[in-house]
Amino acid sequence: MKINRVAWRGYRVPFLWSPVAHGALRASHRHGLLIRITADDGSTGIGEASPIGAGSPTQLEEIAKIIKESAAALLGRELVGEYPRSLVFIRIGMLSAKLFPPQKSSPPARAAGFGLETAMLDLVSRAMGWAFLEPKHPERIQRSAETPIRTNALITTSGYEELATEIELARSQGMTSFKIKVGRRPLSEELETLRAVRELAGSNATIRLDANGLWTPDEAVAVLKRFKPFGIEYIEQPVSPEDPKGLAEVRRRSAVPIAADEAVVSWPAVKKLIEIDAADIFIVKAARLGFHHAVFLTSALTKRNRTVVITSSLESGIGILAAAHLTKFLPLNAPACGLATASLLEHDLLEAPLIVENGCLTLPQGPGIGAAVNPEALERYAVPPKGEVTE
């Protein structure tokens, strides 16, 4: 089973709740890139190589250029051969790590690596009838593909009526965990939003926040003091990811639990956060890390009894499902994950759309990632770049 074709296609899908905030930006569309890898026996695999957040045409061109340059190292490569399953997966991970070293690669390169690696894993898994990812946890209860994944709703609006509509939709799907972006508006407005979300979601709902590193340590401590009465589950990255000591300071001075998000970029960075007690929770985004590195970090953190939350990066259904397989490493009582973002898009590009029921996402059954791209939808939302490299 040798790779003989690597193809890519850009997409642009409107957000249903427009515009959606990501970091300091607001966007009306999600720009992303899908990859399809084909083997000489006709087997295919699909992956997603999209930028973190909403993306842009320029970012797609950067990622496509890296994919084209990297394809030469993949064409003609034997993926299975006589190797046992575990070694096949390790070899694909090692190849991805060689092409895209976790600590040296740029964000576009990591996105390309995530898409290429997951496409190769999907190809092999489908062809051999294997699960996409099947970790073993002899030391604790084993999650499986059938284990429902609790999810949070990402709140993207702010007006009371809009909040009521958005929260009612999430509640109709059984979700009781709500995530709100903070740090972008006057404090008085954000406090009003928190009051409204708490009122609309109910006293039993959990509310988590994400500041995307916008505050100084002193600012974070002062603001979190005002937020605490609303019963905050945790806040992601209240200070810059370049300031781990500042994050540790906020954790010491604030009663609100602290999650590291943008600071989770490599195992050395995570080890430093652990050493200085900088975070209670670690957010793992596979698209930011590369898949093999995300697998390693998730496994290493859970083995050390650290709390991990797996999140998407606003991808289509393909990227969400690839990330969702990482939840197999998590304990059964893990917090809700940020994997319900397909509902933010007009279409998730899948033949069978992702559905949240009883507040949970369940992985599709079957080999590989477990889903197929809807060709009509991809054609409808297709944008440049488009290309392929063949042997």
Image (cartoon, helix red, strand yellow):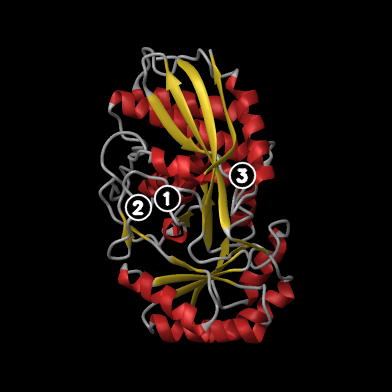
Q: Disc 2 marks which amino acid?
A: Leu
Q: Residue at x 52, y 27 (%)?
A: 7
Does 368 sit left or right of 106 as displayed?
Answer: left
Q: Earlier in the sequence, mark 2 or mark 1?
A: 1
Q: Position of residue 175 (x, y in %)?
A: 35, 69
Whether residues under marks 2 and 1 lie with C-beta atoms below 8 angstroms apart, the answer is yes
Circle on res. 266: 3
The disc, 3 or 2, on the residue closer to the chain's N-terminal end is 3
Residue 62 rendering spot, x and y as whole percentages: 68, 37
Q: Amino acid at mark 3?
A: Ser
Q: Which residue is mark 1?
A: 348
Q: Residues within 10 Å of mark 2 (few under 14, many from 20)?
A: many
Q: Quarter holding the N terminus?
A: top left
**Front-most of 82 and 46?**
46
Horizontal and vertical percent for residue 382?
A: 52, 41
Classify residue 182 as left or right of residue 173: right
**Can residue 111 be seen in this snapshot?**
yes
Q: Are marks 3 and 2 in contact (CB under 8 Å)?
A: no
Say which of marks 2 and 1 sits in front. Answer: 1
The circle on residue 354 is 2
Q: Earlier in the sequence, mark 1 or mark 3?
A: 3
Inspect the image, locate mark 1, and give the three-letter code of the amino acid beneath it. Answer: Asp
Q: CA distance from mark 1 to mark 3?
A: 29 Å
